[in-house]
Amino acid sequence: MQISRIRLWLLALVAALTVGAAQLAVPTVVFAQDQAATKASAEPIDYAAWDKDAATAEDVIAAARASSKAMEDMRARIVVWRTRFEAGKTINAAQIETLKAQIAGLGAYPADGTAEAPEIAERRRQLNETLVRQQAPGLAAVEAFSRADGIIRQIDTLIRERQADALLKLLPSPMNPLNWPSGAAVLTQGTKTLWAEVDTSWKNPARRAELRDNLPIIAILVVLAGLLLWRGPGFMERLAMRLEKRATLRGRTLVAALISLGQVILPVAGMILLVGAIFLSGITGPRLEALLKALPLAAISLFVARWLGSWLFSDDQRIAGIRLTDRPAEARFHATAIGFVLGIEEFRSAFTTEVRPPLSQAAQAVWLAPVVCAVAVFLFRLGLLLRRQSLEAGQSREDVLFRQRMVLVIGSACALVAVVAPLLAVIGYVAAANALIWPAVHSLGLIGFLILAQRFLTDVYVIVTKSGDEGREALIPVLIGFLLALASLPVFALTWGARSSDLSEVWTRFQAGVDLGGTRIAPMAMVTLLIIFALGYMVTRILQGALRTSLLPRTKLDKGAQNAAVAGLGYLGLILSGLAAVTAAGINLSGLAIVAGALSVGVGLGLQNIVQNFVSGVILLVERPITEGDTIEVSGKTGVVKAISVRSTRISTGDQAEVIVPNAQFISGMVTNFTRENLKSKLVVPVTVGYGADTRVVESVLREIVEAQPLVVLKPSPSVHLTGFTQTGMTFEVGAILSDLNFKPAVLSEVNHQIVERFRALGIELPHDRLASATELDERAAAVVVPEAPQAADAAPVKKADINNVPDDDVDPDRR
């Protein structure tokens, strides 16, 4: 399993390098144009030459007869001019700013017809004339830039229209049997041409002599080619198995790399040697040379497709790029078949390119349509396999993974392209079919490369961080995949027919930036802004750390004031860093007034609570009605303040929980701070005793108990009061001041314990005992039924004394 995973790393490295090479190849024309334009921008602008080139370009565009290649060449020249004009916009920029400042220093024009001092008026006139002269080159560059940009847009529009016309061109249908002889004639004529080339070369004595001289080398190359093509991969695998038993873990990595690289490199190298041997024979002609040059490309298509299929659809689900639990072998077969047909297309293109005269429209349709239909069959089946796997995964789990959804989309797109492209080819839109099917195949291969590259870099991250398999679900691997996809966008664009000039134009527009509220924000300005802000933020954090650990501890400020000072310094540093970054980036804040106004509306509507809490947090840090360590009560929650931030305050309650309270509640609500001035707190103990107890004795006992507590303050002295009478007994209230609020629960518990112990020792009845006896009396009274006395004369009246004869122990005191 370890060897297979290491093989995947190295295979994906090859894929990543391939994608990187393609990515580097994409902007080659862009960079070349930029370098030429930069070199030209350093020279003085010759507006006469520009007018001549611009007039010529406008005439060519109006005629619309030049070839697309001539249009591209002319466009490249106009791009150089446009870059020079872009640089010319800032000519004399420093002098212009200085002159504007000088004019502003003279003050505004006098109002209400008041005459200006002659020397001031003369100076203002001189400065304005100088300003006009300094602005003239920049204004000319702006006008020329607009003209050049318009010409470039017209050329791009014309070329795109030609491309669209070529794609929508209707050729004779290849399904018409009348067109088949034209295709057969191309094959017959091509075969005769190849035979004639070989026959002519063979009859040439010089060519035969060259063949005899090179025969040993040719034989060696043919033998090596055969070994590399047929025996190379198996030989490398056997060699790897031998070395694997002796090599260390790191050595096994190298062996696995050789195995995976050999699956592609060795067969392609063998094909190159075979082609080289044929060239050395001296019997090749122009037509055969074109075919031989296509063989290495065809080999690359075949073996790379097989390599991709073997790793994307591996039977080992742990290393497979796309996990197919159903028919992975069939998916590998279709991937290899697509590569084989792609190689046939390379060979066909080379065979028909050198045909003279060029192919007729009927012959083109007959030669192109069969290859499109062949690759569509395998692409359609592969798309169905991808769709089936994604749907099955989605049915087994409610949360379908993003990768599964993407596989579903890719599979659906493959199946759709495989249906539409053959239909277009059969109808006669062969160019449109080619423009659809082959970019789809190349994009599918590029997606496979990206999957393996992301898998390889993820494995590298897991090894470096030693995070194990859980590291694959971290943020860094996701970002790696995003960056790979972003870097591959130009490759996808070129695959689907974009021109290199289109990419250079996109890059130019990107460098120019976007217009936001009348202010143009360029990418380099944003990079400058981020760098300056990051530096300011780092300096602010350093100053905060020094203030917190070195300076403030030596002052008499309490901890809350120190935290407020540190927080204030942090906000001040962020504001200054933002202003410095915006200034260094050259962004005009006045132009963003409209955008700021729109944002303020959004803040007022959607962020109202956040802003309210933020302002409340600033007030708390400045006024400091509460500080860290205070015991407070807010919104029914009592606890100790642990931290005060600009949005909320953390309070630790007694049950080991933390409550996050928005700061607005401290400003708009009622807050009780038990330790604002000191840690003292009042202790109140309610006590209830039975009616039979001596109140003076109870008062004395309670006073002795509370005064004996070590944390009770004796000045003022504790108080004991008889506060009232209830159904169950007499109530007393013990009041005392504690020196430390944090020990209030412990003191209360100790006082209650001692009350129970002393009362029991003295025989003072506790309230729950008295309550029980009263309840029993109520139950007995409710059970007694007293009949009403008759109104007869001989009836004896009930005397009040009879009731009074009830024993005192059975009468509720409240009923006496």
Image (cartoon, grey):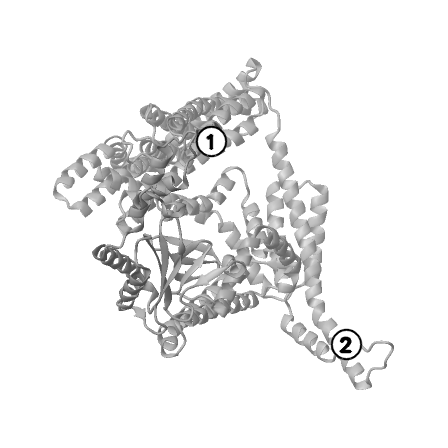
Which residue is identified by label 1?
Answer: 409
Foreground tag (2 vs 1): 2
Q: Is residue 541 left or right of residue 48?
A: left
Q: Where is residue 607 drawn, in percent x and y?
A: 56, 53
Residue 299 percent coordinates (x, y)? 36, 33
Q: Which residue is mark 2?
A: 108
From this viewpoint, is residue 538 visible?
yes
In this rendering, position of residue 418 left or right of residue 448? right
In the rendered view, tell whether residue 2 sits above or below residue 581.
above
Identify the residue at image location x=62%, y=34%: 164
Residue type at tag 1: Val
Q: CA distance from mark 2 to mark 1?
A: 66 Å
Amino acid at circle 2: Ala
SS for dot 2: loop
Q: Residues within 10 Å of mark 1 (few under 14, many from 20)?
A: some
Could you tell which of marks 2 and 1 lies nearer the N-terminus?
2
